[in-house]
Image (cartoon, helix red, strand yellow):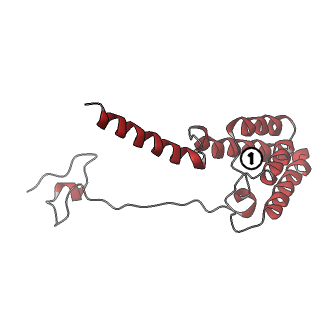
């Protein structure tokens, strides 16, 4: 008679392997489905996103209103197939919803979460260094010069 598995052990772990390696697993990818208003939040520089969060915290909808203008200044969004004017008006609509529903606290809470989303979306851009188009070419020229000088200096 075989003993029962201990607490925390599964019956599958107690049985010998059935052809699968013990470390094999399944890779699962999860993607968040965003609505049009949520996808219209622009990816802004980190300081601008923090200012918008601050504005949204104290005046519901004001930070969202300011973020709408960053779209006109070239901030990208998760709606690449829509024209920037359409994305601008989606952000203005979100700001109006926040302002109009702030009376019953829903808009104020939505506004704070919207500002937090702006900061979260800006965070990946915080550590990235923007490389200008001519920088790659100039770095390659410098590498070539270093190689030539190292070959000439024996």
Q: Position of residue 136 (x, y in %)?
A: 52, 47
Tell me the residue that label 1 is attached to.
114
Q: Which residue occupies 80% across, 47% down?
A: 67
Choose between 54 and 149: the one closer to the eye. 149
Choose between 145 and 97: the one closer to the eye. 145
Q: Is residue 13 left or right of residue 111?
A: left
Q: Position of residue 145 (x, y in %)?
A: 41, 39
Picture mark count = 1
Q: Position of residue 54 (x, y in %)?
A: 78, 34
Secondary structure under tag 1 reads: helix
Q: Position of residue 61 (x, y in %)?
A: 85, 45
Q: Is residue 7 left or right of residue 68?
A: left
Q: In which quarter of the view is residue 47 placed?
A: top right
Name the residue furthest bottom: 81
Q: Is residue 11 left or right of residue 97?
A: left
Name the residue furthest top: 153
Quadrant of the drawing holding the C terminus: top left
């Amino acid at each position: 008679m075989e003993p029962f598995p201990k607490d925390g052990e599964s019956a599958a772990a107690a049985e010998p392997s059935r052809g699968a390696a013990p470390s094999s697993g399944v890779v699962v990818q999860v993607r968040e489905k965003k609505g049009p208003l949520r996808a219209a939040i622009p990816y802004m520089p980190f300081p601008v996103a923090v200012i918008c969060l601050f504005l949204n915290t104290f005046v519901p909808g004001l930070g969202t209103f300011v973020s709408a203008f960053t779209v006109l200044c070239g901030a990208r969004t998760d709606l690449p197939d829509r024209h920037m004017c359409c994305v601008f008006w989606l952000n203005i609509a979100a700001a109006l919803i926040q302002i109009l529903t702030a009376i019953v606290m829903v808009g104020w809470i939505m506004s704070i979460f919207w500002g937090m989303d702006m900061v979260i979306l800006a965070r990946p851009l915080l550590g990235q260094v923007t490389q200008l188009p001519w920088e790659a070419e100039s770095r390659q020229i410098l590498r070539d010069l270093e190689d030539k000088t190292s070959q000439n200096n024996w």
